[in-house]
Amino acid sequence: MKDVQQQVQEAIDLLIDSGAERGLQVAVYRRGEQVVDAVAGVADPTTGRPVTPDTPIYSYSTGKGATSTVAHVLVERGLFGYDTRIGELWPEFGTLGKENATVRHALTHAVGVPGIPADTTPEDLTDWDKMCAIIADSLPWWEPGTATAYHAYTFGYIVGELVRRATDKSISQVLREEVAAPLGVADELYFGVPESKLGRLARLEDAEGSVEYLASMPDDSPFFKWGPRATFPTAEFGNRADVLMADIPAGGKMSARAVARMYAALLDEVGGSRLISPERLREVSAVAFSGVDEIMGNPVSWALGYTLGRPGADPQEAPTAFGFWGAGGSIAYADTATGISFALTKNRLSSDFGAAERVSEIITKALAES
């Protein structure tokens, strides 16, 4: 029988050869040991630069998993707790009906400020202080903790400002010092990318028809309650140098190897480092809030800062898997039952998760049999 590395490599080579994808990375850890490190395709179609295992790719909301992980590491160190009121650390936020909003509410998208103003520009998103001031001055859409809706952009600023107030450091610096550097992936896991490193990133491209689809969406589409068209996760937006260099921790720039290693270090010790205790792992990976998304209308369940389930499986079928999906088709997760952590990152922004579902199924089956 082919080993799992060979099976994954053949699968992603086929995705590239068929023209379905441009560049792909897949990484898998099991109980602290890497078992898959596969890449295929090109990082930059204009130059032919190949994807390598250490190529960072802007993977949009997949980066929220890193944002949440930073928060858990700081809780582990005692800098704040899940039931700490946000206003205790960030007084400007604790006003206008948000006085009782907590860290737990932020992590479960229940804090009540899911949208950014309709006139927000990409340049605004790169201005940390401006965005935090706007969010602090926002009226909550509901009493914090009583409902949920995906906080597409605001999640990153809220958690990131909590981190800054607790440590007096940017969330990028804390990510590097407390997570990425101890795991040996400091140059592969970023929020804001240093200007000197921009040339290492993959170039994003839109899947055929996706830009036209965005343009055809009516102005009253629920999606635009998260933010205006100009801030949507397209290739044009994600290739901007100012966006790539900015701390916008609703998303992240990462290699599959780096983010899979991060999730592996939530489950187990990896190279001498473990990010959180087994007791905290049980807490952060359990269902923390369930409800109907107030914007999209679908039923949702949140762990503490993570989505639940794995690609191709109903969350009820894989309740022990937690991670985050990103617009464009990237994903990373860990599974407490199997000890597996998985990441797939890619630079062609598709509207589905077909590649992740296909590869995750291969891995789940192969490792269950070994």
Image (spheres, helix red, strand yellow):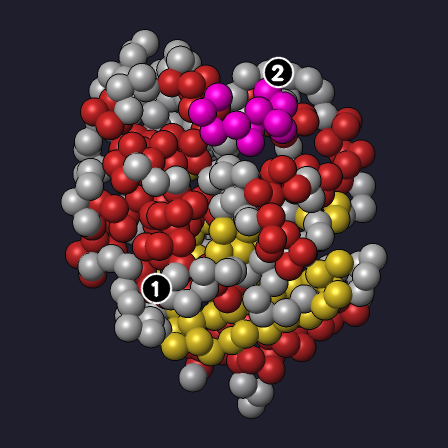
User: Which quarter of the rendering shows the C terminus?
Assistant: bottom left
- For the residue marked with disc 2, what is the amino acid? Asp
Q: Position of residue 139 (x, y in %)?
A: 39, 11
Residue placed farthest to the front in the image?
Answer: 196
Q: Residue furthest top?
A: 96
Residue 177 lies in quadrant:
bottom left
- Residue at point 53% right, 56% down? 254
Q: Position of residue 59 (x, y in %)?
A: 57, 50
Quarter of the image with the N terminus in it:
bottom right
Prevailing SS of the magenta stretch: helix
| Residue 274 picture quarter | bottom left
Asked if disc 1 and disc 2 are in contact, CB closer than 8 Å, the reply is: no
**Quick one: label 1, few (<14), some, or many (20+) residues within 10 Å?**
some
Q: Is residue 145 above or below residue 68?
A: above
Where in the figure is residue 242, as x and y percent of width and height?
A: 63, 37
Residues shaded magenta: 120-130
Residue at 55% x, 49% y: name it.
194
> Residue 263 in magenta?
no
Q: Nearer the viewer, residue 165 or 275?
A: 165
Q: Which mark is residue 119?
A: 2
- Residue on which disc 1 sits: 182
Relative to 73, residue 99 above or below: above
Q: Is residue 245 visible?
A: yes
Amino acid at dot 1: Pro
Reply yes or no: does residue 124 show up in magenta. yes
Give above or below for 200 relative to 62. Answer: below
134 sits to left or right of 362? left
